[in-house]
Image (cartoon, rainbow, N blue to C red):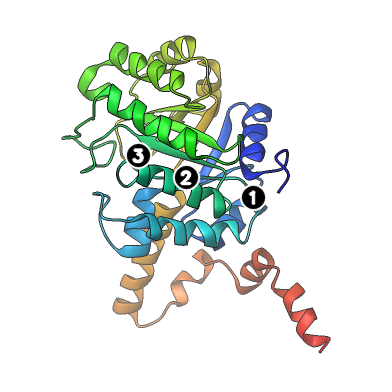
Amino acid sequence: MPQDNTPGKKFRTAVSKEKPLQVVGTINAYCARMAEHAGYKAIYLSGAGVANASLGLPDLALTSLNDVLEDARRITDVTPLPLLVDIDTGWGSSLNIARTIRQMSKAGVAAVHIEDQSFNKRCGHRPGKQLVSPTEMVDRIKAAVDARTDKHFVIMARTDALQAEGLAASIDRAALYVEAGADMIFMEAVTELEQYKTITQQIHVPVLANITEFGVTPLFTVEELRKVGVSLVLYPLSAFRAMNHAAWQVYETLRLDGTQASLIDQMQTREELYRNLDYHVYEKQLNKK
């Protein structure tokens, strides 16, 4: 693939054109197609989402590189939208991290974020997180940067230091990560708009705001985040949570009522499904035979 038309280049272009860029979580390939049809310019695969949805496990470092790769490949196979992928801590040493980057790039992924938690990582909005030293995280970033074969492939550094070490220390870490080669910064568990403003004023690469529900970060609007200099707004599991709530209601209703009749108006129709899948295009090809 020409270096000027790679997934990484597409992601960087999207960041430069839409300010801030809304990046929506897509739990599977069909969700990715819906996001594309809804007009998004970039999409996301959450590590927690892979653990929860694909494996039925909590987000506690229980997934492998291959687990995430499988879901990533399925998404990149069906949409040209650039995909940002959560690679947790990189699944091991510098050699493992290098392999992760090569495999992600080979799978058509545009960008990854790697974090500074210990290998026994936790959800970024839960207590008890343990961080590695800034030096160890710098080594992770350097391993990732050195491993990429596409210069546009995006290495985003996530820091979970805000809760434990405070804003100043988090910014110091972010600055070290950028110096090590990180293209963008993901500051986790921010609680105030002014914190984002301070971060973006001192860190001169694109900064991502993780606007996840039921966490410690308020649900700031795109306009609010634009005003404080945020470049990307991430909604990692919004659709997944809504899907889960809807599925639970369906399961309960079927069990109690013995029919889904009362739920029909809440369901995506067969025709809507077909439209998102380009079903009729495939059917026309079958009819030609």
Q: Is residue 152 above or below residue 77?
A: above
Q: Is residue 15 above or below residue 279?
A: above
Under circle 2, the secondary element is: helix
Q: Is residue 155 left or right of residue 167?
A: right
Asked whether disc 1 touches disc 3, contact meaning CB atoms under 8 Å apart, the reply is no
Q: Nearer the viewer, residue 185 or 255?
A: 185
Of callouts 1 and 2, which one flags the residue occurring earlier in the amino acid sequence? Answer: 1
**Amino acid at dot 2:** Ile
Where does the image place residue 34, in percent across and percent down from the top left?
Answer: 60, 56
Where does the image place residue 43, in percent across and percent down from the top left?
Answer: 55, 46
**Amino acid at dot 3:** Ser
The residue mark sitting in front, 3 or 2, is: 3
Where does the image place residue 36, in percent across and percent down from the top left?
Answer: 64, 51
The residue sitting at 48% across, 34% down in the picture is: 146
Q: Quadrant of the C terminus?
A: bottom right
Residue behind mark 2: 101
Given the current orientation, which residue lies at the most extreme right position?
A: 288
Q: Is residue 168 left or right of residue 148?
A: left
Under circle 3, the secondary element is: helix
Q: Quadrant of residue 78?
A: bottom right
Residue behind mark 1: 38
Residue 40 in sight from this viewpoint: no
The residue mark sitting in front, 1 or 2, is: 2
Q: CA distance from mark 1 to mark 3?
A: 38 Å
Residue 204 in sight from this viewpoint: yes
**Amino acid at dot 1:** Ala
